[in-house]
């Protein structure tokens, strides 16, 4: 199949592109590079030895998207083109709603015009909200979120469900990611956040490489075994494999299907710090700080549905995730912006 990756130069998009190409699919990338680099596309081609058609395009722009559909015979769309920083979404809610909802609507409208019927969506564990019991199962109702970013994911899921209800031709796969970390085994592609990282693993990697002085652990008084929050960390290459299986599944599926993509095993912030240290032989300086607003004490996935329906399972363990993160960061201390010096 030919798969359009909206936001395909970003962290999860670039790893998925590699896995799709390795599985024999064709890949078209549309990215506005607002939170990614064109260099990622070069690296995808280098890793796979295959050509990627790429467009510098904002997928809110219907004209730009129409052109992509007119110039390529697209069979399936994966929508990764979302803003994703929780804290920023609290400061800039309108920008988050505008970007995340409009990209989804424009893709749906242009797909309909072009006769493209398969939509795979980057959703998040955040849609389970604050009410559901752990582990999260796909049959649970969506909950209420503590920030606009989370609400955009809830709304986009609802929009896609309504669109599929109204159009029996439309197939939608909602992939609810837990906490993706790690990088391609080669260290050529990886996570490259702009500015100060919001998420734990890129922050640790930047401490390891000397870009940050120390990690602050947000709270050690949670009702968890060591007092720090627990999450379900998943290797980005296992997540990418989940996308390949979702695309294959969407080929013959009908309606909306939801899959959790997590390992089902929670690790605490201290587990991550210590495993990173052991796997890489590096000390990570850290201090305890206050809780971060909106953090849940712990959550993890029940991913049995993905195992049963997609024959998917996470193959890489936490050591692999920590080793591959460091392999990427030490080869690319400033991410894709080599030689441009320190960011803020
Ligand atoms: N943490 C720290 N210090 C840091 C950064 C994070 O202690 O500098 C802690 C957090 O408090 C949390 C854990 O590390 O306990 C993981 O934090 P991340 O920011 O890496 O991940 P979250 O679980 O908060 O966020 C993830 C996704 C979001 C999603 C959210 C809720 O990144 O997209 O889960 O599902 F919205």
Image: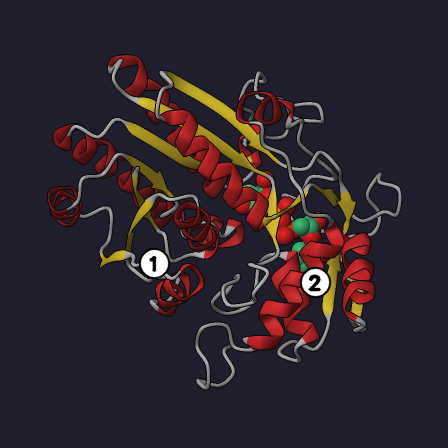
Say which residue label 2 marks.
323
- In this orientation, which residue lies closer to the viewer: 61 or 170? 170
- The answer to whether 142 appears left or right of 59 in the picture is right
Please tell me which residue is depicted at 35% across the width and 25% down the height of the picture: 251
**Is there any visible trace of residue 260 in the rendered image?**
yes
Label 2 CB, ligand 1: below 8 Å?
no
Say which residue label 1 marks.
50
- Residue 313 horizontal/vertical position (percent): 63, 34
Label 1 CB, ligand 1: below 8 Å?
no
User: Dot 2: within a 10 Å radius of its alpha carbon, few (fewer than 14), some, or many (20 or more) residues?
Assistant: many
- Residue 218 horizontal/vertical position (percent): 73, 55
Q: How is the image coloured?
A: secondary structure
- The answer to whether 123 appears left or right of 268 in the picture is left
- Residue 334 horizontal/vertical position (percent): 52, 77
- Gap in Å between the C-alphas at discs 2 and 1? 27 Å
Please tell me which residue is depicted at 31% across the width and 28% down the height of the picture: 118
279 over 294 or under it: above or below = below
296 over 338 or under it: above or below = above
Choose the circle earlier in sequence order: 2 or 1.
1
User: Dot 1: within a 10 Å radius of its alpha carbon, few (fewer than 14), some, or many (20 or more) residues?
Assistant: some
The quarter of the rendered structure image containing the N terminus is top left
Please tell me which residue is depicted at 52% across the width and 62% down the height of the picture: 190
- The answer to whether 63 appears left or right of 116 in the picture is left
For mark 2, give the secondary structure: helix
- The answer to whether 290 appears left or right of 83 in the picture is right
């Amino acid at each position: 199949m030919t798969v359009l990756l909206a936001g395909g130069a970003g962290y999860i998009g670039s790893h998925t592109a590699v896995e799709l190409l390795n599985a024999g699919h064709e890949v078209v990338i549309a990215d506005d590079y607002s939170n990614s680099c064109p260099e990622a596309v070069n690296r995808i081609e280098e890793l796979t030895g295959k050509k990627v058609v790429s467009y510098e395009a904002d997928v809110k722009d219907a004209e730009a998207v129409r052109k992509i559909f007119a110039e390529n015979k697209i069979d399936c769309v994966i929508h990764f083109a979302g803003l994703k920083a929780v804290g920023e979404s609290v400061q800039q809610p309108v920008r988050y709603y505008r970007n995340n909802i409009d990209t989804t609507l424009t893709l749906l409208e242009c797909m309909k015009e072009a006769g493209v019927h398969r939509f795979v969506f980057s959703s998040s564990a955040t849609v389970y909200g604050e009410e559901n019991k752990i582990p999260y199962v796909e049959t649970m109702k969506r909950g209420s979120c503590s920030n606009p970013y989370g609400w955009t994911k809830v709304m986009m899921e609802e929009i896609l469900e309504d669109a599929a209800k109204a159009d029996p031709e439309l197939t939608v796969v909602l992939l609810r990611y837990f906490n993706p970390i790690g990088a391609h085994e080669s260290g050529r592609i990886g996570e490259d956040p702009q500015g100060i990282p919001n998420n734990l693993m890129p922050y640790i990697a930047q401490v390891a490489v000397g870009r940050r002085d120390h990690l602050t652990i947000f709270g050690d008084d949670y009702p968890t075994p060591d007092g720090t929050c627990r999450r379900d960390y998943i290797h980005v290459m296992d997540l990418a494999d989940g996308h390949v299986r979702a695309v294959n599944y969407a080929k013959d599926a009908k309606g909306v299907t939801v899959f959790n993509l997590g390992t089902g095993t929670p690790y605490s912030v201290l587990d991550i710090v210590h495993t990173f240290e052991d796997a890489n032989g590096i000390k990570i300086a850290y201090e305890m700080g206050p809780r971060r607003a909106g953090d849940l004490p712990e959550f993890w996935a029940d991913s049995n549905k993905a195992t049963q329906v997609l024959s998917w399972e996470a193959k890489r363990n936490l050591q692999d995730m920590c080793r591959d993160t460091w392999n990427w960061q030490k080869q690319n201390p400033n991410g894709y912006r080599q030689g441009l010096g320190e960011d803020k």
